[in-house]
Image (cartoon, grey):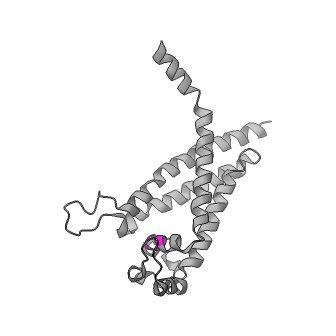
Amino acid sequence: MFIRRIFEAAARLDRIGLTVTRIGLMVVLLWIGGLKAFRYEADGIIPFVANSPFMSFLLKDPANYKSHKNPEGALVPANREWHEQNGTYVFAYGLGSVIVIYGLLIGTNPWLPQVAAVGSFLVFTMSFVTLSFLITTPECWVPALGDAQHGFPYLSGAGRLVIKDAIMMGAALVTMADSAKTYLQRTAA
């Protein structure tokens, strides 16, 4: 009887879970999108962008990014100058703006669920593109530096960051479906 009550209580948490999921998506999108305005974040995404067939054409010199990578927190003026000339920062500002807009679209759910559904669909699509980095970006895998564990399936820090988008993808589908249902209920004749 006690176990059943626990499961009954858990079953009633679906709406709260959906709200937490939506808020979580918004927070992540607004925060990560906002961080794209800072150069350290833009420096960090260069391996993904430079290796992506969907994005590398937006940079002036994607092939030479490896010699201009800045360690997180390091200020190397020559590398920053290269990124400036490469278009890294302009790309990051644009990408960050798009990501923030997606978060804001999802936040319109109480008033404009149809807009929120579109925002969630766009996040789903963005997550698909991000997950493609596992295929296109060598830095997603532990390099062969002497340890027996390298390459596939050994995710590097960059790879572990990317794989989390599988959760974003699922959350976007859940919020999209919920927003679409709300819209359909409001417009039913």
| Residue 184 in the image, given as x and y percentages of width and height | 72, 40
For residue 122, above or below residue 36: above
| Residue 18 in the image, given as x and y percentages of width and height | 60, 39
Q: Residue furthest front?
A: 74
Magenta span: predominant SS is helix
- In-image side of 53 versus 115 (left or right): left
| Residue 26 in the image, given as x and y percentages of width and height | 62, 52
For residue 61, above or below residue 155: below
| Residue 125 in the image, given as x and y percentages of width and height | 55, 58
Instruction: Specify start and end residues of the magenta stretch as a single range.
Output: 44-49
Q: Residue furthest top?
A: 1
Identify the residue at image location x=38%, y=79%. Answer: 66
Q: Quadrant of residue 105?
A: bottom right
For residue 126, above or below residue 46: above
- In-image side of 139 versus 76 (left or right): left
155 and 178: which is toward the camera: 155
Identify the residue at image location x=48%, y=61%. Answer: 130
Q: Quadrant of residue 155?
A: bottom left
Identify the residue at image location x=72%, y=50%. Answer: 108
In the image, residue 167 lies in the stretch drawn in magenta: no
126 and 2: which is toward the camera: 2
- Quick one: quadrant of the C terminus? top right
61 and 41: which is toward the camera: 41
179 and 78: which is toward the camera: 78
Identify the residue at image location x=74%, y=44%. Answer: 110
